[in-house]
Amino acid sequence: MAKTAVQPINESRPGKVVSVTLTTILLAALALLLWWMQSAISDVYILKITRLCAINITLALAMNLINGFTGIFSLGHAGFMAVGAYTTALLTIPAKSKEMMFMIAPLIKPLDTLTLPFPVALAAGGLLSALFAYLIGMPCLRLRGDYLAIATLGFSEIIRVLIMNAQRLTNGAMGLRSIPANATMAWTYGVALITIAFMALLTSSSYGRALKAIREDEIAAESMGVSLFSHKMMSFMISAFFAGVGGGLLAAYNGTIGQDMFRVSMTYNILMIVVMGGMGSISGSVISAFVVTIGQEWLRFLDGPLTIGSIHTDGVVGLRMVVFAALLLIIIVFFRNGLFGTNEATWSGLWRSIGRMSGHKKRGEAA
Amino acid sequence: MLEVNNVTMQFGGLIAVNDLTMFVDYQEIVALIGPNGAGKTTAFNMITGVYRPTSGHIALNKENITGTRPDRIAQRGMARTFQNIRLFKALSVLDNVVIAQHLRLKSNWLTSTLRLPRYNAENRLMYERAEELLTYMGLWDVRGEVSSSLPYGAQRKLEIARALATQPVMLLLDEPAAGMNPAESQELTGLIQGVRDHFKLTILLIEHHMDVVMDISDRIYVLDYGNLIAVGTPAEIQANDAVIQAYLGVEENEA
């Protein structure tokens, strides 16, 4: 097993100041870059993908909390995203559009005319999703390992089927259209930043430590007075909250949603980001969200007409996913810990690896 | 301090512990011994809430804890170590001890995440206590190491430190000297007595090393095939025929 970097207990003052400064500079630079991109790049496609990266950060971090930090293999992500997406959509679509859209049966009473500001709708989506997590967690979190994965996956599908059939609430199989395009650069990255900060603070708090203890050894954690069920439930609900918020952003990003979007493959997409970045690593998930989102778009050429040497195809739809599935398999087989394992990217860590690469082996290395 | 009354544990047709009655007084060190498979660890698991006894009652500090969940029992002041070490392997030595104090945290998850002043104060205290405990155990210098990378003896000590971090009134040690050489178990004997006096603890331990048991125990309970066959001071147990038979077997010509 790889030796994890030793975390200093009280990071020395100057060291801490330097990292805080560097982080602030990085964030400011990122904000400037995004702001510049919005005015300088006219290619809507690139801007869209940039925003999708941010949404995927939120979704991946939500999943990482339960799967990576708590060590519970939950596959219910798509279901929670669907709850968030439909809630946000229904609360922001203008009344006129709703009336036109619900052709088979009208939308139930208060919702048909109700429209709320986007942030309120997002939060409502997250909270409703957390409520669903509570109900699903009641039976599921008493299970372990594979059984829990299958049960959560089942509930996620149940949510999808309910959405398909609740005609008067969700417009059934026809889905929802005309969702106001609120998923701007500011909102997507703003929410991603809040999620990063929240997760970083939560996982480094005493509760985060308790979750890691559960991941390491449930029996020992319980004997040390950590209530397994309530801590798992907390983790599950917070995860679902952010999955719901991410789903809401996705709805606003897409403009249209349907139950079809929230199949199991959606869960796997996010799972791939989490596994690739490292289960239990926040910075890993963030970097991996960019890599996977951009990679998935870049690989789109595989779906189109291809000429490899003398072989020519007219385009195989889905080849991209085949390649991605193969990549996921390679990661799981050969790089099980992903990019970072359970570690975080830190400035001092970056400094050390730069030092190693340039061949400077100075003091401290030998020890 | 601890009272176990007529406790029986049955797994299907197998009676692992049969009608066990025992008590441990305040600040006493009591050993539970017996040949392999005698039901010692089963008794431990019932006392700490891992198993719910088939019948009988267990009380800690006069409060009934029969069938209570392990985390609740830990909160009431019972801490334990494990026969096959169960540290939080991938986490640092320091984290192991800090985590064990989580059960005494009063802040909720939200105020902890938001780092409100009360949480910060509590958190600082956790680290201070961890420093105290690790220093006491002689593990402060390796606080940053991954716990599974420690040598075996140090892992055993860390398990005791982690148990102490829960601020227990009673400590249960499951074979603390397992795998130790005579010198190490000698040191452990001193450590356990020191811990008892320093933290005002009551200790119940399972142990196979007879020198350790005879050295530190005030009283000894002997189990064999789930039945209690003897109780007494070390001297009494050493002279007890039933115990000698259980351990060495009966020699017919001498019996």
Image (cartoon, grey):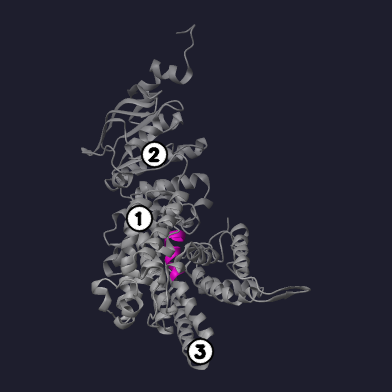
Using residue A274 as the reference point, say whether residue B240 is left or right of it.
left
Amino acid beneath label 3 = Met
Instruction: Report, in whole angstroms, how far the alpha carbon at label 2 lies from the one at label 3.
Output: 62 Å
Q: Quadrant of the C terminus of chain A?
A: bottom right
Q: Are marks 2 and 1 on the same chain?
A: no
Q: Element under label 1?
A: helix
The one nearer the camera, A242 or B181, is A242
Answer with mark 1 or mark 3, whichever residue precedes in sequence. Answer: 3
Name the residue tied to disc 2.
Answer: B173
* Labels 1 and 3 share a subunit: yes
Q: Amino acid at mark 2?
A: Leu
x%, y% of residue A196? 42, 72
Determine the chain carrying the residue at label 2.
B
The answer to whether A364 is drawn above or below residue A73 in the figure is below
Give the CA distance from mark 2 to mark 1.
34 Å
The residue that mark 1 highlights is: A137
The subunit carrying tag 1 is A
Question: Tag 3's secondary structure?
Answer: helix
Q: Are marks 1 and 3 in contact (CB under 8 Å)?
A: no
- Label disc, if present, on residue A37 of the rendered structure: 3
Q: Quick check: A22 above or below B237?
A: below
Is residue A68 covered in magenta? yes
Residue drawn at point x = 31 percent, y = 31 percent: B54
Where residue A238 sits in the image (x, y, percent)? 36, 64
Badge 1 local density, few (<14 within 10 Å), some, or many (20+)?
A: many
Q: Work out which quarter of the rendered image holds the N terminus of chain A and state it.
A: bottom right
**Where is residue B211, by image quadrant?**
top left
Q: Which x, y percent locates residue A297?
A: 57, 76
Looking at the image, can residue B55 be seen?
yes
Q: CA distance from mark 1 to mark 3?
A: 42 Å
Residue B96 appears in which quarter of the rendering?
A: bottom left
